[in-house]
Amino acid sequence: MRDWNTNRSQRTNTKYCCLLKLKFFPVIASICLLLFQTPSNAADYTVSTINDTKIAYTSFGSGEPIFILNGGPRRQSKHFESVARSLSSLGFKAILFDQRGTGQSTLKNINRSTVTLDNMVEDLEALRNHLGFKKIILFGHSFGGIYAASYAQRYPNYLAVLIFSAAPALDLKWLKYFMANVYSRIDLESRIQHKYLTSSEYSKKNPIKAKTESITPLLPAYL
């Protein structure tokens, strides 16, 4: 296990924080609004077979490469196009790609053996190599933060900067405590409504609608 509590690591973390403040603050400040915008003119994706896996990707702008690892999982990368365009306007080459088994990155079989974090890390490394980048910036939002940290641990030599946006811990044990904290901040009626909207009985009718509506009862916890 890498010892992150070294002087070298502290200097690196300081460098990352400075870069974040100087280059990414305009994007971070508006990230909550941008993440939920669906682009009116969706970008064209290139689908390449890399290491026997189909990976769909697209890019915006030119400059230092920054890969946007979207949250979800299961969420398509097209929903992060507004973020990619904002980053490209700051002088970066922003790359979006559909994570395996989502969007246009299709798999013949989707199961616990084909969709693993290890496989996803290898997909990202294969895509970096395919596109010819020596070092990359990773921008991991939510679950994408877990993804980015896993890549950083395995391929630190290819990482220039690591950025987390609303990212959780490195496993999913935090969900239990997170939801308990959220529920403590909303009233009983909102809790009952959320439990109903996330129940299998309701969500099986229209999963996308149910997922969107289930956010509403939780909003008072954040405001």
Image (cartoon, rainbow, N blue to C red):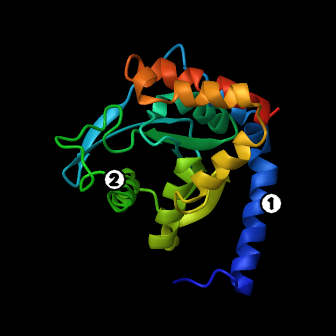
Residue depicted at x 49% and y 40%:
72
Mark 1 or mark 2: which comes first in sequence? 1
- Residue 119 picture quarter: bottom left
Tell me if mark 1 has few (under 14), some (14-19) or many (20+) residues whose alpha carbon lies within 10 angstroms of its own.
Answer: few
In this rendering, does residue 59 appear at all? Answer: yes
| Number of numbered callouts drawn | 2
Read off the residue under disc 2: 130
Residue depicted at x 40% and y 54%:
124
Q: Residue 32: give x, y in percent of width and height.
A: 71, 33
Q: Amino acid at mark 2?
A: His
The residue furthest top is 40
Q: Of 4 and 14, which appears nearest the observer?
A: 4
> Residues under labels 1 and 2: Cα distance?
30 Å
* In-image side of 121 versus 79 (left or right): left
Q: Residue 73: give x, y in percent of width and height.
A: 45, 43
Q: Residue 208: give x, y in percent of width and height.
A: 46, 22
Q: Which label belongs to residue 18?
A: 1
Kind of element beneath mark 2: helix
Residue depicted at x 45% and y 35%:
75
Q: Residue 91: give x, y in percent of width and height.
A: 66, 41
